[in-house]
Every structure is written in structure tokens, then in C-alpha cells.
Amino acid sequence: MLYPSEFDVIVVGGGHAGTEAALAAARSGSKTLLLTHNIETLGQMSCNPSIGGIGKGHLVKEIDALGGAMAIATDEAGIQFRILNGSKGPAVRATRAQADRIIYKQSIRSRLENQPNLWLFQQAVDDLMVEGNKVVGAVTQVGLRFRARSVVVTAGTFLNGLIHVGLSHYPAGRAGDPPAQSLGKRLQELALPQGRLKTGTPPRIDGRTIDFSKLAEQPGDLDPVPVFSYLGNAAMHPKQVPCWVTHTNARTHDIIRAGLDRSPMYTGVIEGVGPRYCPSIEDKIHRFADKESHQIFLEPEGLTTNEFYPNGVSTSLPFDVQLELIHSLPGLENAFILRPGYAIEYDYFDPRGLTSSLQSRQIEGLFFAGQINGTTGYEEAAAQGLLAGINAARFARNDEPWTPRRDEAYLGVMVDDLITRGVTEPYRMFTSRAEYRLSLREDNADLRLTEVGRELGLVDDIRWDAFNRKRDAIEREVQRLRATWVNPRILTAAIAEPLLGKAIEREYSLFDLLKRPNVSYEALMAARLADDSLLAGPGEADPIVAEQIEIQVKYEGYIARQLDEVQKQAGHENHRIPADIDYDAVRSLSFEVRQKLKTHLPETVGQASRISGMTPAAISLLLIHLKRLQ
Ligand code: FAD
């Protein structure tokens, strides 16, 4: 048959993980097939139309640095941008955007349709072809068989998905989409360790029925408007619009409490564990019983729709209770609900069954990414998808996997957390999960990853040139700051006092002066030195380069200390454990530790040390054993 049925990589599912996986595999040169239920829902945001935030924004920048689509699609679709933690240190500053969900989907779809090496096909995958312990392809609902060297499954919340609204429930992948039951059953047959999780979403409101005069307006950052992608700019953004804020009150809380006897969560109907950091409103009222009010953000879903997303009232209470609780909120007294809120339970697979390349330990060539690994969030899904796509393509070419370390990327932190610790509730990214967060900033994701992205075949010439220009400009300017010395004759007291708060008494480099906490790069550049030939400014730095220089200079000492720490740990991180190690042969290990090691099968001593309950003494015994094996 002329129709192509043999591929290097098959990706199942066109959500956030699947689209990045397919793009990455195809970008790196593999013939890739993306099989998904519905081409219209490629890149669909199942919950709120927003991308980024603390920890999540860091992942989006990393995806971008590796040539992925999420950041640039957000720049094309973002209708409100903000920098969160703007007044705090650079490590925890994060970008967040409200996206027009229709434009976002269009942007993702157009990237997929125009990606060389990538084929899109609309069909449910009902079965995986497995020969021995190897996956060799996928079978669709109408029996079409596609073969491939590797398969990435990114089925999101669809595997045996069950939607709950009050005590009613019905099978679905998310509202409006069918569940993936046959694939769910097939994966159960493969006996991979799995469990059930749940997540939820609020009812949506018709904006024409909101009384905005009773709400507080929350504008985005307008001067300047932030951008997500290293290749993005504010001119790409569509019109910017505000969000709005209202609050729950005593009446809202009474309505919710009175409805709990018909809540699927509080009557034990839902078994799956939900996301602790994105709880339902009934959960919040129950857990924080003494709190009198909760903030609710009303977020526009797009420029061409009246739909609003009330962020903070995710619920699976019965519809009549949802209606009453929404009507109790100031500004929403007459609100019309366009879609009911609901909770969904779904199958996930224990990520401890994966290696750090996101490949199954049991079935060769089978990769998992996204919500199916027990995470929550578009960004977490997309980042895993990118990694799984890269490694599925490398597996198909018999290349070694690429596995970023914890000190290199949030992506490395997330995958290491997942595969060494597993999940007991949906996992979301926070900056506090990264021990090296001073080095893992949003602003330097490109400096950390674009070079390796280029080696992996993910970064095109346009991105590579822009990256090199930026990197060279930073290096040149830092060098100039180090090499330019000023003394009290050049930086006279009249210039020094407004700039530094006092006169200088000896010679300093501009680099040393910039290290001082109150001296900004901009002010230093604006200083008119007495010796014109040493004029500090205007420098050649554009604002992005200037920001990078300032961070690098000011935090040099802290970053150097962190690098020392990384180097100390590097021994463990790079010390590989042979896949066929016999833990029974490691002398003096306790039974419990032995069991943990046999279950987790860590790939490195570093990973072994992070398994919960692992002691320094056990690691020493392991090291002695590894030395003996050499
Ligand atoms: P999805 O985006 O779910 O994509 C899965 C894709 O796979 C879909 O395109 C589907 O059609 C396709 N697919 C599935 N099975 C098959 C098959 N057998 N054959 C072919 N195609 C298949 N995240 C948050 O951060 N905060 C929240 O508050 C939040 N609330 C949520 C509430 C709800 C109700 C839902 C459903 C999700 C929520 N999420 C939330 C999670 C967020 O939507 C997911 O984390 C993210 O979409 C996961 O991306 P993914 O690519 O893994 O899966």
C-alpha cells in the first residue's frame, strides 16, 4: 500500500505532551506519526487557558531553549502577560500568560502541519503491537496497523477516564471527548504498575452575564509586556486584556458545606487522589475551615468568545450547588453557566517504572509522557513530551538517550523526582523542588540548553544565530566591564555619590562596581566619567543582555558556590550502576534498602541516594560494591 505505515516514531495523543514529542522527534530527523483522537483538539487546553507561573514558566523557557513550540505559541496567543515575583530574586521570577485558547490551538496545529518529517492522522489508538518485550507499533480503532521502532504514549486524562458531576458519572477523556478504554485495557494487560488520580475544573461563565462594576480589575504588565520565547517579541501578542477578581464569602461557604453530602469526593465515590496545589473549592473550604474568603480570578478565555474561566472554583459538586455557589459571588449574581464544572478520574502509570529517558523499563521502545506519568499541568506535560520525543527518536536510531541532570534543567529535576520517588498525588513543578535553583533560572534557560539542543538536532539556524549573538554580546560586555578600571580621578566624588552612595577611595573595575547591591547596569552605563575615553555607556547591551549581565555579575559569588556543590555531587551523578547489578550481592545492606534498590533500579548512585529512606551508610556500601565490580 502506498499509504505510509512504517515510521521511526509513533506518538499517541495530540495534547501538550504529544505535540511537543512529535515535533521534537520529527525535528531531530525521525519519520514521525502523530495519532490522535481528533485533529481539531491538537494543543487543546483542558482546563484554564493559561501558561506558565512559578516553576512552570521555567519549564516553558526550557522547552523553548530546546526548540519546542509552547513558548512561541503562547507569544502568539497571549492576551495577558505578567512577571510573577518580579520584586524577588531572579531564581524565582516567572512569566505567566493568559492565552486565547483558539489562537493557541491554531498556533500549535500550524506548527505541526508544517513540520517536515511529521505525519498527522486522526484515529483513536486501541492497541499497541508488542513482540516479546518490545513495542513495534500501534493499532487504531478501525484496525489500521502502523509500525515503528518506538512509541510514545501521551494519553493525558483519557485512560479509563470517568467524569463526575455530583453523584452522576460517565466515561469520558475530558468534557466533550471520548475516553480511551481499549488502550487503557491494553496497557493494564501489559501489567505495568499503575494507579488512579483525579483532577477537576470549574464551571465556565458567559461574560455577558458578569457585572464587572463589582469586580476589581487586574491588568497585565504593560511596560514592557513580557514575552515567553527567546525568539518572541511583544509585537507578536494579540490585543492585551485584563483579568478580574472577586471573592467567596460566608454564604458561598455555607452553600458548599450544605452540598457536601452530594459531593463525589466527600461521599467516597471518587477514589483517585487530586492535586494538592490546585484543590477544588470544596476541598479548600474543608481544609482551611477558618478562612473567611478565597480569591477568585475571572480570566477571559479569548478575544473572540464571551467565555470566562473562574480560577479558584474547580468543583465536582452537583450542578444546582455549582449554580448557587457561583451566584453567591459578587459580580456573578446573575451569571449564566456555559459549562458545568467536573472532576475526572483516570489511570496513570507509576513513573518509577520508567528510566530517565522516559522509556518503560519493562517494554523496550515504549515511552510515556505527560499526565499519564502522574503529573498535572500543560507545562509539565509538554516538557516530558519533548524529552520523550527526543529519546524515542534517539532510540529508533540506536543513539544513547539524552537525560538532563538536576543541575542542568527543571526538566531534569522533574524526571528525576518522578522516576526516583514516584507520585502519591498529581505532581506539579515548583522552584522549591530544585536544589540548584539559583542556576536554573528562566532568564538563562537558553544559555543552559540551546547548545545541547543544537547538538541534538532540535535547534534551527534562526534560533542558533540569535542565541550566538546574545551569548557573544554578554561575553564581550562582561569582559569590557572587567577590563575597564576607574579611579577617584575618573569616577569623581560628584559622579560616585549619586551612583554608589559614597565616593570611591581606590581603583575599581566596572565589574566590581556593578556587584554592589544598589548599582544597576543602567545607572552605571549612564554615569558620565571624567575621562571620556572610558565612558561607561551606553554599552552595546539590549535590555535582555543587560539583565543577564547584571544577574551574572551580582550573583557571581552565590552561583560559584552552587557550582562547587554541583561538582561535589557530580561524582555520584555520573557514577553509573550496571543494569544487571545483583543487589543481593551487596554486603551488609539491610533487607529494606535492598528491596528499595531492586524496585527502583536506579541508573546512577546519585539517583540511588534520592530514593526515599536511602541512608548515607547504604550508599557507602553500594559504592564499595561498585568498586569491587570494576
Ligand atoms: P492531554 O492534554 O489530556 O492530551 C491527551 C491527548 O491524547 C488528547 O489529545 C487525546 O485526544 C489524546 N488521546 C488519548 N488517548 C488516545 C488514544 N487512545 N488514541 C488517540 N489519541 C488519544 N492542569 C493544571 O495545571 N491545573 C489544573 O487545574 C488542571 N485541571 C484540569 C482539569 C481537568 C478536568 C482536566 C481534564 C485537566 C486538568 N489539568 C490541569 C491538566 C492538564 O489539562 C493536563 O495536565 C495536560 O493537558 C496534560 O497534557 P497531556 O498531553 O499529558 O494530556
Image: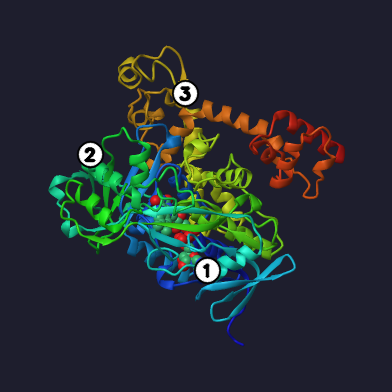
Residue most toward the left? Answer: 213
Residue pointed to by mark 2: 250
The amino acid on which the numbered mark 3 sits, given as a three-letter code, is Asp
Q: How far across and how far down the image is residue 127, in percent?
A: 60, 72
- Residue 536: image tag: none
Q: State the separation of the CA atoms marked 2 and 3.
A: 56 Å
Circle 1/circle 2 CB separation < 8 Å:
no
SS for callout 2? helix
Instruction: Find out if the beta carbon at label 1 lies less than 8 Å from the nearest ligand 1 atom.
Output: no
Q: Which mark is residue 181?
A: 1
In the displayed structure image, the side of residue 593 where residue 4 appears, left or right: left
Mark nearer the viewer, 2 or 3? 2
Comparing 557 with 432, the one in front is: 432
Residue type at mark 2 is Ala
Res. 71 in view: no
If the picture is divided into quarters, which one holds ligand 1?
bottom left
- Mark 2, other Cα within 10 Å: few <14 / some 14–19 / many ≥20: few
Q: Secondary structure at mark 3?
A: helix
